[in-house]
Amino acid sequence: MLLTDSASLATPPAPCSVRSFRKAYAQARIALGKRMLALGIDDGELGSEIRLVEDAIASCDAAGEDCKALRLERLHLLVKLADAALANDAPLPGADAELRRALDAQRALREQVRRRRGVAPMA
């Protein structure tokens, strides 16, 4: 890699922020929740709630209204669904890859928080 800016030589690379780890973890949880919903893996209650919100979003979109709050509610429910699976740490047939990514993101976030606090890494 050719560096042309002398300032870049003196500036060390920025460490990954806890914020970026939180974002990656949130995205992994949303992906897991979406996959679980698509496969019908839920407690019955959360899946029904998500479908009701999705119906409300469709109606809202059709009416040309602002659906931001409904979309945020849907994301919140998807994360809740994923969190239930993460708490159980049980196999999820058809969603194993998403579960593994969410667990990896969770571990990475915890490790980054420990590093920031100066706590020794867990073995």
Image: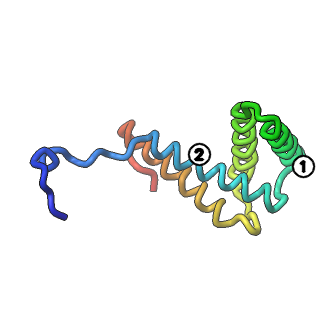
The quarter of the rendered structure image containing the N terminus is bottom left
Q: Residue at x 82, y 35 (%)?
A: 63
Image coordinates of residue 88 in percent, x first then y, are 73, 53
**Label 1 crowding class (10 Å Cα cut-off): few <14, some 14-19, many 20+?**
few
Q: Residue at x 13, y 50 (%)?
A: 5
* Residue 115 falls in image quadrant: top left
| Residue 18 percent location from the top left of the image | 44, 41
Q: Nearer the viewer, residue 48 or 25?
A: 48
Q: How is the image coloured?
A: rainbow
Q: Is residue 115 left or right of residue 52?
A: left
Q: Amino acid at mark 1?
A: Gly
Q: Residue furthest left?
A: 6
Q: Which residue is mark 1?
A: 44
Q: How many marks?
A: 2
Relative to 102, say whether 75 is above or below.
Answer: above
Residues 106 and 66: in front is 66
Image height of 72 relative to 101, above or below: above
Residue plotted at (56% across, 50% down): 106
Measuring from the top left, give residue 85's x and y in whole percent: 73, 52
Indicate the amino acid at tag 2.
Ala
The residue most toward the bottom is 94
Q: What number is the disc on residue 26?
A: 2
Q: What kind of element bears circle 2?
A: helix
Of the numbered discs 2 and 1, the one sitting upstream in the chain is 2
**Residue 97: quadrant of the picture:** bottom right
Q: Is residue 7 left or right of residue 103?
A: left
State which quarter of the image contains the C terminus.
bottom left
Category of crowding for the residue at label 2, using alpha-carbon neighbours closer than 10 angstroms: few (below 14), some (14–19), many (at least 20): some
Q: CA distance from mark 2 to mark 1?
A: 23 Å
Residue 44, horizontal then vertical, whole percent = 90, 49
Q: SS class of the residue under badge 1?
A: loop
